[in-house]
Every structure is written in structure tokens, then in C-alpha cells.
Image (tube, rainbow, N blue to C red):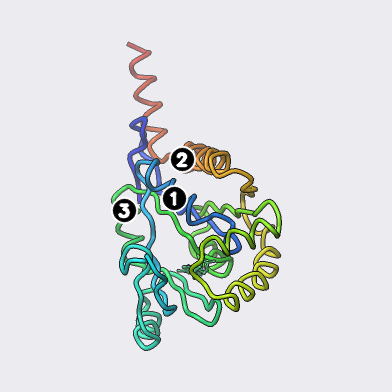
Amino acid sequence: MTAQGFDGVERRGLMFVLSSPSGAGKTTLSRMLIDRMPGLKMSVSATTRPKRPGEVDGRDYFFVDKAKFETMAKQGELLEWATVFDNRYGTPRLPVETALSAGQDVLFDIDWQGTQQLREKARADVVSVFILPPSASDLEKRLHTRAQDSEEVIRGRMDRATHELSHWAEYDYIVVNHDVDAAFAEVQSILQAERLKRERRTGLTEFVRGLQRQLEK
Ligand code: 5GP
């Protein structure tokens, strides 16, 4: 799986994972990355949870019923899957493989369970970032502002946030989202630096040989 780097040197595509407790701003950061970073494609997950107002099937998620999800999992169509808030969430395998082999990087908005599974399958290609909210009250405020969930669901998400937070140390990078533009700049820098990692740049040897040949002339 090789991608053409922006400087013309071929490299392997990477799997860029963002995780956080719900309400830490991960969805906003994901959208900003997709809009502003060329060569990055969003992985759209399948889920059994009901669609929220404003969500679009095929853009935000593939909304499927339990039976369909089970079939996808059984037939090996999911790269990873997990149960979150009593619903199933999973990453369809084919679009990820297609994007990576077409030379694109893939962005995942998945939880720690999915991140662990991706890491087991493709350690060298996974770069993971955990987004932290600046405070518990900030997290609660964002969950309320979103106004898409009932009080009971919000309470459940706050409870689950404590559990999610306990997995922070499994991630390669940690970003504290005090300010969305500053957090975006940090996440963007991580992606830019990871794209330049020597071991990912499969075309470097050939490129340097070319330089040497030119210098010898
Ligand atoms: P939400 O219901 O708020 O959209 O997502 C709930 C949680 O499920 C989030 O932490 C999100 O990152 C996670 N999630 C979304 N899609 C997937 C997926 O395909 N796999 C896994 N493991 N988690 C997912």
C-alpha cells in the first residue's frame, strides 16, 4: 500500500485514529481535518444506533439493523467492531483497503476498543491520537449544546467518559482541546510529521539514489 507523498516521494498510507470521550470535540476536529488536509479520507462506520437529527446515512454512518451488522461481522466485512452504549459500531474493511491502496490516508473516529484491534492488525500503519476535554464541566456543556440527546443519554455518556479516559495511555499522542483551532493545529502537525516518518517513506532509497546520480554527473 503506497501513496505518493506531497514531495513526490512514495510512502505507505497511514491509519490516523482519533478517540475521545463523547463531547470532547472529536467530530469537529475530524471534519476540519477532512476539509483541510488533502489525501485524507474519512472511514464511515456502520452502526446499529438510531440516527440523530441532522445525520445522513452514508456520510455520518451507515445505519444498519442488528441482523445486518451481525452478517457483516460474520462475513469478515468489518476491520474492527465494538459495542458502545449498547449499540454496535464497526469499520467496513473494503473502503479502508481501497483508500489505502489508492494512496490515501484514512481517518478513523473510533473508540479505544476499535483502536486496540487496528493496532493488533496493522501496528506500523496506525497513528493514534486521544483528545481530552479541558474539564468535566466543559464536556458536560458540549454534550448539552449538541442538544441531540436526552438527559438520560447525556448522563450515560458522562459516566462512560470516565471509563474512556482510563485508556488515554494506550495512545501515541494526547491533545487537550482547550480551543478548537489550537487543537486542530496540533492534530494537523501530528499528521504532517507522521507522513514524513522515514520508515513510512518506501520510495526514499530510490529518491536518494537519484539525487546521488545527479550529483555525480
Ligand atoms: P456516537 O454514537 O457518539 O456517534 O459514537 C459513540 C462512540 O462510538 C464514539 O466514541 C465513537 O468514536 C465510537 N465509534 C464510532 N464508530 C466506531 C467504529 O466503527 N468502531 C468503534 N470501535 N467505535 C466507533
The residue under the point 57% across, 63% down is 143
The residue under the point 68% across, 51% down is 134
Q: Is residue 85 above or below residue 116?
A: below
Residue 72 in which image quadrant: bottom left
Q: Answer few, some or many: residues within 10 Å of disc 3's Cα (few below 14, many 20 plus, some between 14 and 19).
A: some
Viewer-side residue, 103 vs 204: 103
Q: Is residue 114 left or right of residue 170?
A: left
What percent of the width, then of the height, locates residue 99? 32, 55
Residue 9 in which image quadrant: top left
Viewer-side residue, 155 vs 86: 155
What percent of the width, then of the height, locates residue 210? 34, 24
Q: Amino acid at mark 3?
A: Ser
**Mark 1 and mark 2 residues within 8 Å of each other at the beta carbon:** yes
Q: Secondary structure at mark 2?
A: helix
- Label 3 to label 2: alpha-carbon separation: 16 Å
- Label 1 to label 2: alpha-carbon separation: 8 Å
What percent of the width, then of the height, locates residue 13? 40, 48
> Which image quadrant: the C terminus?
top left
What percent of the width, then of the height, locates residue 55? 37, 66
**Can you identify the residue that label 1 sits on?**
14
Q: Is residue 58 above or below residue 188?
A: below
**Can you identify the residue that label 3 sits on?**
101
Q: Secondary structure at mark 1?
A: loop
